[in-house]
Image: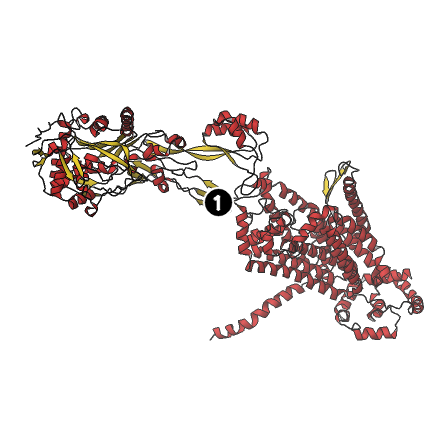
Amino acid sequence: MTLAPESERSPQRDPLMWLAVLRGLLDRPLASYYLLLASSGLLLVIGLAMVFSATNVRAHFDGNSYSVIVQQVGAAVIGLAAFWICQRLPRRTFRALAPTAVIITLILLLIMDGLALLHASGVLPQPRIGPVHSETLWLYLGPVQLQPSELAKFALVLWGADVLTRKGRRVVHWRELVMPLFPAVGMLFVLVGYTDLGSMLCLVILFVGLLWAAGVPLRFFGMMLGAALIGIAGLIMAPGKSQYRSARFGSFFQSDAEIVKCVKDQCYQAKQGLLAIADGGWFGVGLGKGRLTWGWLPSAHNDFIFAVIAEELGVVGCLVVLTLFAVLAYSGMRIARRVTDPFRRMAACAVTLWLVGQAFINIGGVVKLLPITGLPLPFISDGGTALVVTLAAVGMLASFARAEPDASAALHARPPAKWAQLVWAPLPPLPAPARPADVESTEQRSVNA
Amino acid sequence: MAGDDNRRRRSGIGDARAYTPRGRTTRDTDAINRSERPERGERPERAEKPARVVVPRDRAATRAAMRGRPAPRRAPQRRPIKPVVTVTPPRLGHPKRRLRLATAISLLLFVIIGVRLVHLQLTDAPAYAAAGLQDRLKTVVLPAPRGSILDREGAVLARSIEARYVAADPGLVTDPAAVAAQLSPLLGVAASELFAAMQKKKDELTGKAVRFVWLKRGVDVEQATAISSLKLKGIIVDRDERREVPGDDLAANIIGFTGTDLTGLGGIEARFDSDLRGRDGKFVFEVGQGDLRKPIPGGYQLVTPAKPGKSLKLTIDRDVQFMTQRILAEKMREKNATWAAAIVLDARTGEVVAQASYPTYSAKNADASKASERVDMATNYVVDPGSIHKAIVLSAALQEGVITPTSTVEVAPTIRKGDTTFKDGHPFPAGTHLTMPGLMAYSSNVGTIKVVEALGAQKLYDYQRLFGLGTETGIGVPGEAPGLVQPPENWSGSSYGSIPIGHSVAVTPLQMAAVYAAIANDGVWVQPHLIKEICEPDGKVTPAAAAKSHRVISAENAASLRQIMEAVTVLDDATGVNARLAGYRISGKTGTGTQVKDGKYIPGEVASFIGMAPADQPRYVIAVFAHTAGGGGGAVAGPAFRDMMGYTLRHFKVPPTGTKPPDFVITA
């Protein structure tokens, strides 16, 4: 008597219930903010665990198991500080810093590439001048070691968003769009792409994201796509130092079975990546129990860390990481969609596409959906500069998330305690009664006119 | 104020406008374009914006003031330009729609990766994982030493000891002359030999450079360590096993020898190779790469334990074997024998206590010996036994009741059978009634032939077979000959004379020793055997397969025959006086046969003596066979028998016989 109605009711209710709950949760004003924090925080933690797992064997035999992870944790702490700062900064500071950031980045890249070029042409015996020396992707300024190409990503986001915001609607005109953006961005591409094709691809994606969010007409994208394909093909086919790169690209066209049987150097990394995924199976061999981290898998701690995840945590672990990236992509795009201000929209879109693109290029290379390019996996790979810059960018996204009109209104309606604002983040600006970008663009137009 | 204002706008109609496709359809756009509106081809929505943008803020107030002016100024400027710019400027993309698309594409990318991972796992991943594992495996061989060969007391006759091999990779040796000079004193190999081995050369079959050359195997561990410490480039030192034979030529013909890879190549080493040989185990484990080439904890591991070879405990007694070999060698050198064999059998058990061949060889250096020296002559050589065969005739006759111990047989100096006349070596006048002891003591051919006449060919043949002639004994030495006895249907006329006295019969010395052992063992034939026990590596001891045995004659007849044969050594002018041993009663028989090789009788004679002691209660049977230019069994083999028997009895603490031999009557 009592059972019948319940059993009738539950199948009707349940499938709708969880959807409704999910909708309800997503409709909350701070949903993007929490999704962003949760996904990037979990990715950071997983990343630290995996970096330790991938490096402790080598580090152990080199003397100290913790030598690499300690550095990475240090970078994470600096990164969290950067996150904290970026989350607090108001929009105008980002915009104000944009030109400076790009100029500094360009200078650093010029120094790095210049030293490498001078060394390559035989002018310098070592790629070093005084305390400054360059080593492939790294620039050493005295004790500080950084990757200018990582800084370039964040700088391009800021500056590009700033310029495009100022252009406003005029971006529909090719001339307006091109100057001064394209020469500067082109220079950035060349300087980064000289040593690091992967980062350059990432910059391209990021730049496309900026233009996409700015509302640049589709026909321009078509033109740019053509140019980009020609450029990439040229870089891959370029002789000299990029021989290895083109060889690795070549292995992309082999089938899985061919790669597994392959004994040549050029498919070694792809092969070990596949073997790691195969070895992991569905549930993995267990955290820290990976065998390919015993010197088999090259770049196990950075470019190929996803293979380590696949081996140790299995398909299930990989799907968790992919889901976290998907949540990050969703929340980043949601922020871009919800913010009213075009600078925030473009910057959020560009940062999200940068992280998504970098993650996809990296993971795609490991699972052999794409050629191997040598990009780190955001949040997860070992590498200080990349982690700090990523966390800073996420900090900026977080500040944008708080500036969503609904979020801002909610925070103002029930503001956190004063000390919490001081320690964590100040109250976001109240949403402007009208869209400031429109105000600005109109203003600009009028000035131009 | 501002907040309220904003909230109203956001939540109200403004929001709705943002989502409605108003003004964005192609129809609308076309209409706009056609009408050449002055708004640069943009959406009419734009027209409303200034109104929405009006913000009651201090800064905005001034902007609003500015905004008023340019609008009318701009319109007249654009209008004349419009026809000049023939291309209509494209529309600005709609941000929210574009961002939705970007979200969808981003999520799709991750889904693609997820699908790829799941697909890989569902299809090829297990096979790839297995293939990858193979790449990461390293195998270490766990060596299993070859079993030992021990004597009946457990003393080592042959054993394996751990050693090292020294080899060279000619491709890596830079200065062969210097390396050879350094290695020569340590290896005990001439420097010139080493130098030649280390020369770079190409493999004849493959044409590739030879990268491995043995320099010496079985090197002592100490010397190998000294060589390793020299750290010579291209010189390889690794684990090896060496067969050690402490006895040198002790029982070498039985034990045999091994090749360089420790495969048994002769004797028991070859026959029981599968028991002696150990099965190498292996330890397969997963390793890292490069300088991390170490076992991975928790990685794949498979241990197949090594199975050391079984050890064999022989029935041989080291001391008796040594003395037997020594006595045989001394005596036979004196007699200038071509070859000789001696067997010491435990009469009751069939155990071979010693089995010697002359000439013999050094098992330590088997390569230096001739193949003929490595043969176990006691089992591999086939001879015509001669008069020692008469014991079989008398056994059969006694058992079949043709004669009694006290019977006599009428003899003559000669007897003719078929086309041959058979003579006696110690002829008696025709009509002499010879007793059985007399027949044996003087080895009367005529008497024996006459006994067989009474016995019949079939009965003799049956007893020959019962005594084990014509088949291998199965002692456990390779190459044992079965010998040959002819069934009566094959007998020719002269066979009736030759076969009874041990001609036209092919036997091995061991077969004859076994015949006498059966007589010593109260008529029960026991298969002679060499293997006493098989010792498993874990200490478990399995006795060898039980020796086959069967009764041939009754105990009384055996005792009677022993007594009859005692006359051979007791009577002063008998054939076996050389075999007399002070303090012990000896029963035995001399023989003089021939040897057949490759189907022909070869020159010279095979002298033999087989005897047992103590005659009343025999413990040991010793057979001595020797091939010499000529000479009776008593003279050639007797002294050797005497010395061997003397030593064996003392060694096994057999007390001297207390009783006296009976007085023998020769003729009646």
The picture quadrant where one finds residue B244 is top left
Identified at 89% across, 70% down, the residue is: B38
Instruction: Say whether residue A95 is visible.
Output: no
Residue A120 x/y as whole percent: 76, 41
Please give left or right for residue B493 compared with residue A240 in the image: left
What is the chain identity of the residue bearing mark 1? B
Which of the 4 image quadrants contains residue B431?
A: top left
Question: Mark 1 packing: few (<14 Cα in 10 Å), some, or many (20+)?
Answer: some
Q: Which of these two is toward me, A61 or B365? A: B365
Name the residue that disc number 1 marks.
B284
Q: Is residue A169 visible?
A: yes
Q: Where is residue A320 in the image (x, y as percent from the top left)?
A: 60, 57
Secondary-structure class at tag 1: strand
**Most foreground residue, B449 or A158:** B449
In the image as oriented, which residue stretches furthest toward the left? Answer: B668
Colour scheme in use:
secondary structure
User: In x, y percent, where is residue B348?
Assistant: 20, 36
- Taking the spot 80% from the left edge, 49% from the top edge, the residue there is A102
- Residue B73 left/right relative to B285: right
User: Is residue B657 shown above or below B211?
Assistant: above
- Decide which of B483, A412 is in the foreground and name it: B483
On screen, B226 above or below A130? above
**What is the total number of numbered labels drawn onto the structure image?**
1
Quarter of the figure that contains the C terminus of chain A: bottom right
Which quadrant holds residue A15? Answer: bottom right
Q: Where is residue B138 in the image (x, y as percent from the top left)?
A: 51, 44
Amino acid bearing label 1: Val
